[in-house]
Image (cartoon, rainbow, N blue to C red):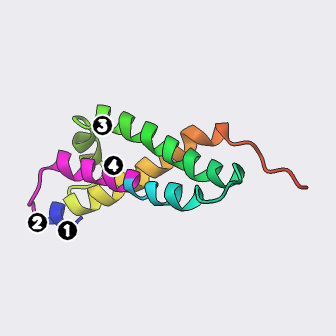
Amino acid sequence: MSLASHQLVTAELTYALVLGANLGTAINPVFEGTRDNNPASRRLPLGNLGTRVIGCLFGMALLPWIPTIMSLFTSDSARAVANFHTFFNLAIAVLFCRFCVPMQSC
């Protein structure tokens, strides 16, 4: 947001950085969760990483149009980056929630 508000990088780059940050935060849990031999402990971190990879691929494909779309909501570049981050995470949640299996009681 700071880079965007000071116009130090292009709009496309700021949105690409948001996608990279989303993907990057999903990698650590994969390394931390895979130390156990229990396959269930790997399921959530790998599922999270997979959904973010797919979301980032779609986000990169839409990257040329994202600045135009975000400018419909606000003219403030820093606010547009924050809005994109929120919209991206909401879109991933809406798209992939249908694949979640409800947790069953033991």
Q: Which residue does the numbered mark 4 point to in the structure image?
A: 19
Mark 4 secondary-structure assignment: helix
Label 1 secondary element: helix
Q: Quadrant of residue 74?
A: bottom left
Residue 100 as seen in the image, left or right of residue 106: left
| Of the image marks 1 and 3, the number of the one nearer the N terminus | 1
Q: Is residue 76 visible?
A: no
Label 1 to label 4: alpha-carbon separation? 16 Å
Q: Position of residue 77 (x, y in %)?
A: 20, 58
| Distance Cα–Cα, label 4 vs label 2 | 20 Å
Q: Amino acid at mark 4?
A: Leu
51 vs 81: above or below = above
Q: Residue at horizontal 46%, vertical 51%?
A: 89
Q: Are marks 1 and 2 in contact (CB under 8 Å)?
A: yes
Give whichever of 88, 23 is nearer the camera. Answer: 23
Q: Residue at x 51, y 41 (%)?
A: 50
Mark 3: secondary structure: helix
Task: Check disc 3 and give the amino acid type.
Answer: Met
Q: Are marks 4 and 3 in contact (CB under 8 Å)?
A: yes
- Residue positioned 69% across, 48% down in the render: 39
The residue indicated by pointer 2 is: 6
Q: Which residues are magenta?
A: 6-23
The residue tagged 3 is 60
1 and 4 marks in contact (CB < 8 Å):
no
